Amino acid sequence: MTSPEDTTAVVRLDLRAGAAALATPQAVRDRVAEQLGRAGLPEPDYPLFLVTDTPAGLTDHQLQYELLSGYRAVGETRILVLLVGSSPGSYAGGAEAYLPDRRLVRPTTLRAATTGLVWAGDLRSARTALDRPEPDDPAALAVLVDLLSVPDVFVRVLEGLRKLPDSVAAPGVRLLEQDLPTEVRDRAWRDALTRFAGEDSGAGDPVDIVPDAQLPEPLRALVTGRDGRGHGHRRPDGRANLAHRTCAESLDRADEDLVALRSFPGLLHPARRDALEADLHQAREDLDGFRALVERALQGGGGAAAPTAEAAARLGALGLRVPAADSAGERVGEGLRELAGRLLGDGLALRSVAQHFTALAGRVEPVPGTALLHRLADHSEESVTRGSATEYAAPPRAPGPVLLMAGAAGLLGGLWQWPAVLAALLVPVLFVVVALLGANRLRTGRRAARWPMGPRIAAVAGAVAGAAAGYAADPPLWLGGTGLLVGLGLTAEAVRRLWRDAADSWAAGRGTTALRTALDGLDTLLAELVREHWAAEERLYCADAARSVAGMLRATAAAADAQAAPEPLAPAGAGGAGPYEDDDWLSAPSALETPESDAADGGADDGDWAAAYAWDNTPDRHRDPEADRNSDPSGDPYGAPYRDRDGGDPGPYGTPSPAAYPAGPDDAPWGSGEGDRAPRWLDREIGEGGPELVATLAGDLRNTAMAAMAPYWGAVERGQAGALALARTEERVRELLSAARHHLWRYGVLAPPPYPADHRARTTAAGLLGTDSLRVAELVGRETDRGAVVQLSSPEQGALLSRDPEAALWIRFAPGTLQGEIEAAWRKSGSPPAEEALWTSSGRYAGLIRLTPLRMGVVDTVLPRQSTGGDDRTDADRAEPSDRSEPSVHAEFREDDRW
């Protein structure tokens, strides 16, 4: 199968009328540029010309054929001439008179190896014997020209003609056209555009962030690479490390003093508390110095903009180590392209992908130091004091074990007989004394520290319970003494625990915990600042490029929305403006029409045959086409010109003329029954759309968008992803979206777009059209007998064909997207696969073409010479085609001029 990238478009010219306009090389180039420009294609390197003409026009239009043969191009110019109608009735200069179709006279210009002639004397479009269509019936001619305009078919037919004598053949065809009705195709196209673009629900909506593990490697390194750069952010000999170490050492000494304070000597002597307070005061001063250094680092670590190399140098002067980028940003463009392809390949809409790129920009963008200044308030002196007060403000609570020990000590100390029961007061008194001493030792200013009441109450309650037990049981003295000793031991342990907890609470209130937390928080903030400077320029560029891609995706979504919007209806009677409506072969009258018919209508209805082929969109499928044409002189079946989806003039990919690309049977004049205009060699199978139609078209649009964005990724990699590259890419996206629409109209739904995904297989005909490919397989695989095709030749021309059945050349063709289905159907039915089958880029037509050579001596190749007398016509008149049945008098042919 030949893809659209491998071949150029086929330029269609109709020389049956208006040939005088192509009398100069510049006129020919202008006509070619006009057609290709409307299709959005550049100047061809290997031009393909499909020329529609009559046998008489071969000699009348010798100048035009010479201009086409000499068309300047990089490669060779190939010309395929489609001749319709009969040849002249007699041969000029000869004594023998021949009946029509007895000779085909061509100039030497058309004898080149890159030129071939297909002579269809009669298009045989009549369905019944009562029909009397013209030999060049417009409906049949439009289909035949549309088929030969497929580059694959054009090239194969021309290659086949080279194998035949004189490169001339009479065609026989049998076609099957599979397509969708116009309204179904338009609705599927709009739905696909809407799905492709996504809903515009606001840029602030939350989006599921792509996990780091699913990011492409270049982007994952920029997102997660800084997280592994938190260690060693301070240089050992730098100012920042010195300030941090000094504060940390002061806090370490304070911790050592706290350990000493928590012991019994700390309860009895005030010196240990004084040492702790001195160390805490020094730690506060050291913390203030470290905080000031962090503040200078934040203020010098980048202003409102992102961190820069100058900011990194200032951090280095403060003793901070900014890690090297390690070439982390060398493949930013590649990573963004891979991420976009992955997200679009997962079926996400454009606006959803744009949100992902916006979120990525926020994750990877470096934060300037000034943006972190507000977090210094969380570690200020006021915050430390507030945190210390919060730690100390909680009311002291005695742990459960201490309460049990206090109660048990009081109980054991109270097991005495009277009068020794007074010893039971010893344990409660000890708890009260320790409480008073500890509260006074931890006094802050004039306020004594609070001591928990629970142990004292438990000791008193235990002593009362012990005294009651002793009064009732009358225990011996040794038991009371033993209980008192054990109670004193429990009292000592309870007091130790109470003092330890009280000292810890007091020290926390003085700032030991808050100062340590502030120091760690400031260091963490400093490490985060250093991490934000890692690969700052690369990450900033990645963030800008991601936002640029997001903006481009949103612009593409807006363009898709504009394409999906309904077209405004123009006033009735406005002229059509489709991309092919001014092509000669659609608009010009046939050269086979008699002068009387031209005189009757004054030559005003030049597009009559094209209008007869136009769609019929009214509910009445059997209305009179003549009445339709009279009611709408524009020839537009919709009664309105095509307007661009954006509301402007028709673009280069405007909706093709209905005459060029007929719709379904309900829209075409040849639906069924009365008024059927489809030629008898054309069968049409119309589907209503398969379940995968919209999803496939949306996938095609995603692939088209990625192809349009391909140059932009190169600009990203080169560091040139600026406004100019973005504008060019957006324009290219809009052009390719229009090209995708043009491709859908030109080649049908089955044909993949010019930019398919290599890994994604095209779905079946049942999934796209709702039809079965079995009919295509049966048609393409039919035996090559004469009944398989309809010979497009008149009865008179039939006598000129070769009678050798082996001389005919057969071409089998079908859409390339159905190749797998068709070959599977052949294997299932046991039919041998067709050899040399042509798998075309078009998805509309499939069938058989038979090229039958002419008998020897039928084709005359002559060297024309201009007549020197008796001809007073102008050069323009000589260039016009002849409508007479007599031989042309534009040139004189002599017997010795034959080749």
Image (cartoon, helix red, strand yellow):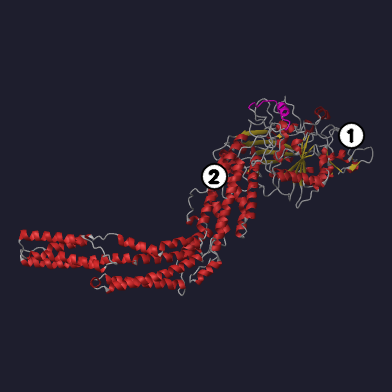
Q: Is 593 positioned to the left or the right of 513 in the image?
A: right
Residue beneath disc 1: 96
Q: Is residue 898 magenta?
A: no
**Disc 1 residue crowd, few under 14, some 14–19, many 20+, Cα 10 Å:** few
**Which of the two discs, 2 and 1, labels the residue nearer the N terminus?**
1
Name the residue rendered at 88%, 41% in the picture.
875
Numbered range of the magenta stretch: 619-634
Q: Is 199 positioned to the left or the right of 269 in the image?
A: right
Q: Is residue 622 magenta?
A: yes
Residue 830 rendering spot, x and y as whole percentages: 58, 40
Residue 220 vs 13, above or below: the answer is: below
Q: Amino acid at mark 1?
A: Glu
**In the structure shown, which secondary structural element does the residue marked by tag 1 occupy?**
loop
Q: Amino acid at mark 2?
A: Asp
**In the structure shown, which secondary structural element does the residue marked by tag 2 occupy?**
loop
Name the residue rendered at 49%, 71% in the picture.
318
Q: Which mark is residue 420?
A: none
Residue 74 rendering spot, x and y as whole percentages: 75, 53
Q: Say which quarter of the image contains residue 428.
A: bottom left
Residue 600 rendering spot, x and y as whole percentages: 81, 27
Tell which of 18 and 258 is nearer to you: 258
Residue at the outermost right position: 869
Q: Is 753 positioned to the left or the right of 868 in the image?
A: left
- Asked if labels 1 and 2 touch by Cβ distance under 8 angstroms, the answer is no
